Every structure is written in structure tokens, then in C-alpha cells.
Image: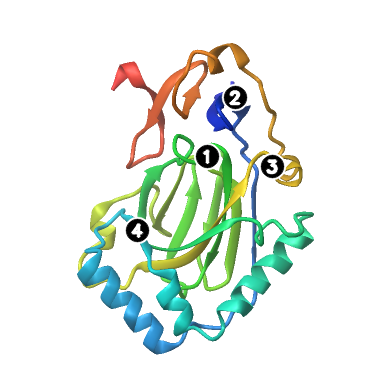
Amino acid sequence: MRDLLTAYFWSGSAIRSRSVSDVVLWGTVDVPAPPARLVADWERETSSRLGLEPGDVEELPLARARARWPDYKHCVQAAGDWTRTLGLPGVLASSDVALMACRGAKYHHDGAQYGGAAFCNLFLSEDRGLDLHFPSAGHRIPLTRGTAVIFDTGQPHAVIQRRSSGFHVADFACGQDCTQVFLTWELSIEDADVGRALRVTFDNDPTTSLQLDEGQVWLNGAPADLCPDSGRWRHADLR
């Protein structure tokens, strides 16, 4: 039987329950390569200030990047045009956006902190032999410049080497060019269009919602977490 995932998230002043969608929407949009001097700035930022380690996902300063990035608006427009084809008009304009970098990414979900959202990611780096992997949902997406993805924050995911079946620190050794930079938008999961596109069911466990005081994701009716190397779920009391 398929595992049943339930996300509990803050909605206003109350915690609400919902299903975790295994729908992953993705495509490739036409975005210009970032200027060389901007890419060099990102490389300095990730290596010196952030000290990006294998598996880390960190935020880059977007305001500074925009000042050196004449095609930023074209990237946003391309992502907006793509979401419109999915029946999601205007969702990016009303959503918070951030600029992120990762040196691979260990298996994780963001449903505890961002359970009220779906993520829309637009990848800006060239193809470096990495895939965005959703092990529970059964999706594996090659990352190239212009790859666009929308997914449920509660869905486990990782960025791993294309030839690999899991996350391994050795795949991201020092000196390898394996950093990915991407824009990410937080889409409200309660937006009618977003919920419909991801086929989310709300208030599927209102009784448990009343007993919780923080966001979390449960597996088959009990708290659970992920193995960061394999992406396999495990009940919290069996760690």
C-alpha cells in the first residue's frame, strides 16, 4: 500500500491538515544565461561567505544580484508564462521570491516550516549532471538552465548526481563544479488554483490538527522523518 502523508500547517491562527501531493509539475523555459560577472559573484559568495558544503541549500542576496542582472525580468516573465499554461495565472506576482544556491541537496522536505506553501523553482545554472529526485513520488528531473518545477513542500526531494541512486557527500567533492543556483517562489497552497493543480485535499485530519502547536508532516498517522542519504521515511520513534 502507498504511504499516506499528511501535512499540518499554520493557516492564520490555527493549524490545518492537508494531504501531501505527489504531483510534480515541470518543464523547461527559455531563459538567458546569467552574465559571467554575476556567475563569478555567486561562486565567490558560495565559497567564501556561505562556505557551501555538500548537501547544503543556502540563500543568496537577490537585491544585489538584480542590480547586476539585466535579464532578471525576462527570467521572471518566462516562469510566469509557464505557470500561466498550467492554469496558475498571476501566482508568482503575489508570492515571495528568493535566490538560492545548493551544492547538491540531501533528502529533505520543507513541510514543517513551509507546510502552507508549494515551491516553484527556476534553475539558472548549466547542466552539471545533477537531477532533482522525488523518491516517494517517483520523479527524477534533469537540472539544466531553464528547468522549472512546482511541487508540494511536504514531498521529499534531493539534488543528486545523475548516475547515483542516493545522496553521497563524495559526489560533491571540493573542486567539482556542481553548484546550482535557482529562483524560488512560495506559492500559497490554499490558493484555489494551486491546490487544484496539485490535487491537494484539505482538512483530512482535523482531530489531530487541534492537538498540535507546530507544523509537521506525518507518515501513516504518526510523526516521521527522512533518511538524508536515501530519502526513505522512518517513524520518529524508530530512529
Residue ranking furthest to the front: 13
Q: Which residue is mark 2?
A: 17
Q: In the rendered structure, which amino acid carries the disc numbered 2?
A: Ser
Task: Report the mark closest to the observer, 4 or 1.
Answer: 4
Write down the quadrant of residue 29 in the picture: bottom right
Q: In the rendered structure, which amino acid carries the disc numbered 1?
A: Gln
Q: In the rendered structure, which amino acid carries the disc numbered 3?
A: Leu
Secondary structure, mark 2, is strand
Classed neighbour count for the residue bearing mark 4: other residues with Cα under 10 Å, few (<14), some (14–19), many (≥20): some
| Cα–Cα span, label 1 and label 2 | 15 Å
Front-most of residues 171 and 108? 108
| Cα–Cα span, label 4 and label 2 | 28 Å
- Location of the C terminus by quadrant is top left
Q: Which residue is mark 4?
A: 58
Task: Report the mark closest to the observer, 3 or 2.
Answer: 2
| Cα–Cα span, label 3 and label 2 | 15 Å
Q: Earlier in the sequence, mark 4 or mark 3?
A: 4
Where's residue 122, x and y in %? Answer: 55, 65
Task: Report the mark closest to the observer, 1 or 2.
Answer: 2
